[in-house]
Amino acid sequence: ANTNMASLMENESHIELTDEMIIQMLTSHLSDNSFWLLIRKYKLKDFSIELSEFSEKEITMLLDEKYFDFTVSRYLKLKGLYYQCSIEFAVKYKADFLDNLGECELVKSDILQFLKRSEFIQEEYIQLICQIASSEVDAELALILREFKFELPKEYVEAAWEALEDGDK
């Protein structure tokens, strides 16, 4: 079936497929190549498949293609299934993610992951940092905050200073 799928996908003509047909194919354990060809050629009008139906590699491919939109529930589902994919999802849909930060149930370990990324700008880093209490700033977070070359809210600077070892200040 996979070789037929590959030849179907590589065919220049576009065969009309219903969402039901696409869903059937997406969830039929295709080879990585066939899956990739399918999602590049056919997009669901309404993505309603449970994310747990997909492997981590398939989720990564879906994210690379921006195959489905950002929702808080998808973010939370991904966070439970494939943590690193949830980080990539949030970064790919940065504006939507930042608009919904308060609902994303972020904890310090999540914030650390985002602070290590280069895709955010100064105001966004501050927005992320403010999702946790300044009392949660520990040495690991303080070392990251120390690298930022912009002004942070005072309570976070003070907490970072307190958390740093004397040699790191």
Image (tube, grey):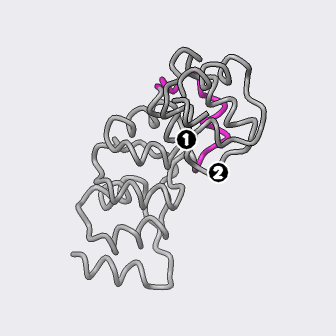
- Where is residue 146, by image quadrant? top right
| Residue found at x 67% / y 45% | 120
Q: Quadrant of the N terminus?
A: bottom left
Q: In the orientation shown, which residue stands out farthest toward the front?
A: 167
User: On residue 114, which mark appears?
Assistant: 1
Q: Amino acid at mark 1?
A: Phe
Mark 1 lies on a secondary structure that is: helix
Q: Which class describes the residues within 10 Å of circle 1: few (<14), some (14-19), or many (20+)?
A: many
Nearer to the camera, 39 or 161 = 161
Q: Which residue is mark 2?
A: 119
Q: In the orientation shown, which residue stands out farthest toward the right?
A: 151
Q: Is residue 115 above or below residue 1?
A: above
User: On residue 60, which mark appears?
Assistant: none
Mark 2 lies on a secondary structure that is: loop
CB contact under 8 Å: marks 1 and 2? no
Nearer to the camera, 17 or 6 = 6
| Residue found at x 64% / y 51% | 119
119 on left or right of 143: right
* SS majority, magenta: helix
11 on left or right of 90: left
Magenta range is 92-107
Residue 123 in the image: state x and y as whole percent: 75, 35
Q: Quadrant of the C terminus?
A: top right
Q: Amino acid at mark 2?
A: Glu
